[in-house]
Amino acid sequence: MEKLIEFKKLYFAYDKDHAFEDFSMDINSKDIVTLIGTPASGKTTLLKLLCNRLPNEGLYYKGMKISSYDPKDLRFEIVVIFDEPTTEDKVKDEITKYVHKLQLTEDEIEKRLTDLNKYFPVKSMYDEKISELYEEQQDLIKILRYLIINPRFLAIDTLLTKLSTLDKRLFFEYIKKHDMTVLNVTTDLNDSLFGNKIYCLDNFTLFLEGSTFSVLKTDTVLKRHGFKLPLPVNLSIGLNNYDILQKYYKESDKLVNALWK
């Protein structure tokens, strides 16, 4: 599997108490990685390093130091989404404002919009004013304006947590269909069930990492850091400990079915 993003012995410090020292973390191509962490643990700092808002020596993209690339060459390959305000009045203008910078033809942009609408039926909202939408709809638009670019690597700072479960599911279906790699920064472990890997930060240090279920099964460590396990996973762990189940479940209906057997 190709290593797409690598932090190799990264050093970055705000001060002596808030510093990445000899920090390493890998993200493979097509990974869906969940990054969780305690408050002020360095999650957003990592994203700022990824999008060149902070000095990023020790960060590699496709095997090369990211600082060796012209930032203009990566702005559509590596996209980091922060919860930043919309600037356009109408929905369609906001969704397409960045994709126009790809220098695509209008036909190609319309094809991307059509593809996006297969997952997120927002076409009926194109002429609506963003300011008149529900907050959850506005948050979705903030994501779609970047999703339509189809970047190679996409990182999201907590914004995905604000979406409905259905929109989250559609989001992950879309990125899998388009072979994107995702780093989802969140404080909600329920979101991790959509991914294949979890990294856990505390005070700028990784204290736990691995495949999604291998990390979730380390429940005492996660709970000690203040994280709540997804309910079906938490129940599965308890029932496995009592030999009532022999599998772990991430979906409540499958857990119920297993208990009925």
Image: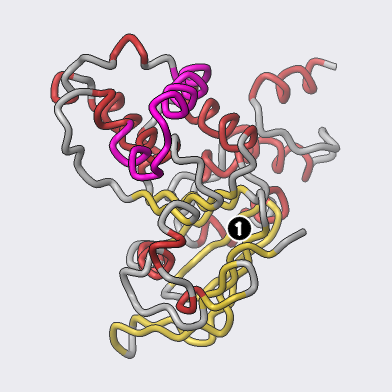
Q: What is the span of residues highlighted in magenta in the rendered image?
A: 96-120
Residue 220 point in image, percent of width and height: 60, 58
Mark 1, secondary structure of its residue? helix
Vertical comparison of 95 with 78: above or below = above
Give the residue number, with chain letter if any, for mark 1. Answer: 220
Residue 44 image position (x, y, % from top left): 36, 62
Above or below, 38 against 176 in this view is below
Residue 18's place in the image compared with 5, above or below, is below
Quarter of the image where the C terminus is located: top right
- The structure residue drawn at horizontal position 20% and vertical position 38%, both measured from the top left corner, is 86
Tell me the colour scheme of the image.
secondary structure
State yes or no: residue 113 in magenta: yes
Report the front residue among 45 and 78: 78
Q: Is residue 47 above or below residue 231?
A: below
Image quadrant occupied by the N terminus: bottom right
Q: Is residue 55 shown left or right of residue 83? A: right
